[in-house]
Image (cartoon, rainbow, N blue to C red):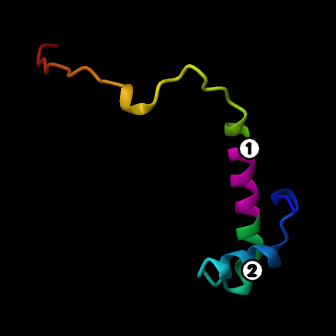
Amino acid sequence: MSLGDLAPAEAARWAARAGLPLPSDRHAEVAAVARHIHSVVAVLRELEFGDTPPALAYRAEQEKPDAAV
């Protein structure tokens, strides 16, 4: 099953398995949020980062404070 067709009852079951029991009035909202998060992550997975160095390679230059306006 893809998250595109995640039913509220299935979202509640997944939450319960993770130790997060949900009140019955929250099942639909949690399923909708899970579907939204999945759609955003799916877009991020399509991005090409082939030549992007890891964050540890980034060195921010130390800015010198200057009070002059």
Where residue 36 appears, as percent x and y from the top left, is: 73, 54
- Residue 37 point in image, percent of width and height: 68, 53
Mark 1 and mark 2: span between their CA atoms?
Answer: 23 Å
Neighbours of disc 1 within 10 Å: few (<14), some (14-19), many (20+): few
- Residue 18 % position (x, y): 62, 77
* Residue lying furthest top: 69
Q: How many marks?
A: 2
Looking at the picture, tell me which residue is in the foreground, 33 or 59: 59
Image height check: is 38 above or below 48?
below
Residue 13, which numbered label? Answer: 2
Q: Is residue 33 above or below residue 42?
A: below
Q: Position of residue 4 (x, y in %)?
A: 85, 56
- x 67%, y 38%: residue: 44
Q: Is residue 25 magenta?
A: no
The numbered mark at residue 61 is none
Q: Which residues are magenta?
A: 32-41
* Left or right, residue 55 beside residue 13: left
| Left or right of residue 52: residue 33 | right
Residue at 60% across, 26% down: 49
Residue 27 horizontal side relative to residue 65, left or right? right
**Secondary element at tag 2:** helix
What quarter of the picture does the N terminus occupy?
Answer: bottom right
Rendered-image quadrant of the C terminus: top left
Residue holding disc 1: 42
20 sits left or right of 29 in the view: left
